[in-house]
Image: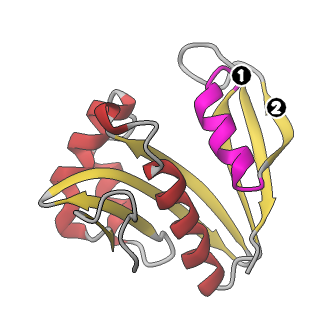
């Protein structure tokens, strides 16, 4: 898998069960602890759940995970280390996850994103996602979730 052209020290690699601690740490730093240890253990052990990480040396700096069901990728979580945001890492890791899902037979992708998360909405828009629906009051904060959908292109 190709390294980030902006930072040759960053490498892309599949997330594996032995990456539990780095996933928990980045989840806490970037998402406030969205998933607990059991949820991460399940995510990393399930072959239907592709997950990719961007690493700088031994530090996980970004990840994107999903679930492939038939011909659809459901993106379940995306995170970038707060101090490294706005450097293209989110685009790289989500784009790579889309390519991996395509290899696994997915032809379309979906995800939910908070309606007030303008950075994520811009990223997903660049990757071809558009809003297909809304889930009112979906997040703990009370904000709505926008259901995003895209075809996975070759």
Q: Residue beneath label 2, please?
A: 134
Residue located farthest toward the front when viewing the structure as drawn: 6
Mark before the other along the chain sequence, 2 or 1: 2
Residue located farthest toward the left when viewing the structure as drawn: 58
Residue 102 lies, in percent from the top left, at 65, 80
Tell me if residue 36 comes above or below residue 134 in the rendering: below
The residue lying at 48 percent from left, 69 percent from top is 49
Quarter of the image where one finds residue 133: top right
Residue 53 lies, in percent from the top left, at 34, 62
Q: Residue beneath label 1, please?
A: 144
State the residue in front, 109 or 7.
Answer: 7
In this picture, residue 128 sits left or right of residue 111: right
The quarter of the image holding the C terminus is bottom right
Give the residues drawn in magenta, as a range: 115-128
State the residue in front, 63 or 9.
Answer: 9
In this picture, residue 71 sits left or right of residue 15: right
Residue 48 lies, in percent from the top left, at 51, 75
**Mainly helix, strand or loop, the magenta region?**
helix
Whether tag 2 and tag 1 are in contact, CB under 8 A, the answer is yes
Q: For mark 2, give the secondary structure.
A: strand
Tell me if residue 71 comes above or below residue 74 in the rendering: below
């Amino acid at each position: 898998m190709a390294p980030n052209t902006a930072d040759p020290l960053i490498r892309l690699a599949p997330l594996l069960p032995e990456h539990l601690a780095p996933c928990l740490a980045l989840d806490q730093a970037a998402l406030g602890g969205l998933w607990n240890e059991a949820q991460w253990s399940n995510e990393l052990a399930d072959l239907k759940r592709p997950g990719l990480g961007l690493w700088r040396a031994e530090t996980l700096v970004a990840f994107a995970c999903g679930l492939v069901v038939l011909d659809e990728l459901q993106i379940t979580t995306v995170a970038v280390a707060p101090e490294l945001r706005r450097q293209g890492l989110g685009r790289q890791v989500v784009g790579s996850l889309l390519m991996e899902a395509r290899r696994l037979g997915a032809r379309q992708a979906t995800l939910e994103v908070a309606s007030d998360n303008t950075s994520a909405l811009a990223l997903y828009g660049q990757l071809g996602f558009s809003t297909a629906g809304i889930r009112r009051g979906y997040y703990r904060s009370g904000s709505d979730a926008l259901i995003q959908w895209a075809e996975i292109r070759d």
